[in-house]
Amino acid sequence: MPQEYFKKDSVAKRFASRNVVDDKKKAQSTLEGDTQKSPDGLTVADLIASLQTMPQEAIVVFVYQSGDYWRTQLAKGVKNVELKKVQYSGYHEMHTIKDIDEDNGDENGNETEGTEVVVLE
C-alpha cells in the first residue's frame, strides 16, 4: 500500500479520537449538571402584559410540531400553571424539569438546584 494511505488513515484516527474526547466532555458536563445556562423565554411581567391585550374569554393553548411529513402544528390547552425548577441538560441540549417536593428539595431532602420558571401544563 502507498505511504499516503497510512498518513490519511492516521489523520482520520486522530480526528475520530478528538470527537470521542469531545463527546466525553459533553457527557461529563451533563452528569455534573451545567446550571449556568438560563432558559430563554418571556418573563412573567412580559406574559402578563401580552395577555392583557388578549380577549378575556380566549382559551390559552400550547402549539407544537407533530413531527409528521406535513409539519402539522398541534394545539393543546393549558390546564395548570406551576412554579418549578429547570436545569440545563447537555445530553438533551435544553432545559429539563427537576422533580421537587413542597419543601423545595429532591427525594433525598437536598435542595434542588436550577432556575425557577413558570410552567404551563
Image (cartoon, helix red, strand yellow):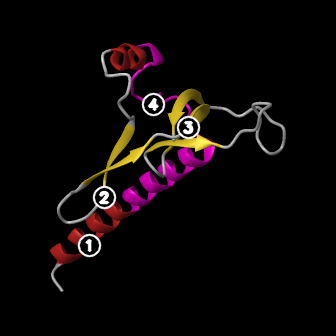
Q: CA gap, disc 3 to disc 2? A: 22 Å
Nearer the observer, 53 or 13: 53
Residue type at numbered disc 4 = Pro
- Which label belongs to residue 80? 3
Name the residue that disc number 1 marks.
9
Q: Earlier in the sequence, mark 2 or mark 4?
A: 4
Q: Nearer the viewer, mark 2 or mark 4?
A: 2
Q: CA gap, disc 3 to disc 4? A: 20 Å
Residue type at numbered disc 1 = Asp
Residue 41, how many percent across, how many down?
Answer: 39, 27
43 is within the stretch colored magenta: yes
The residue at the point 29 percent across, 61 percent down is 67
Asked if residue 52 lies left or right of residue 39, the reply is: left
Residue 83, how many percent across, how many down?
Answer: 61, 29
Residue type at numbered disc 2 = Ser
Residue 108, how many percent across, how many down?
Answer: 83, 43
Name the residue that disc number 4 marks.
39
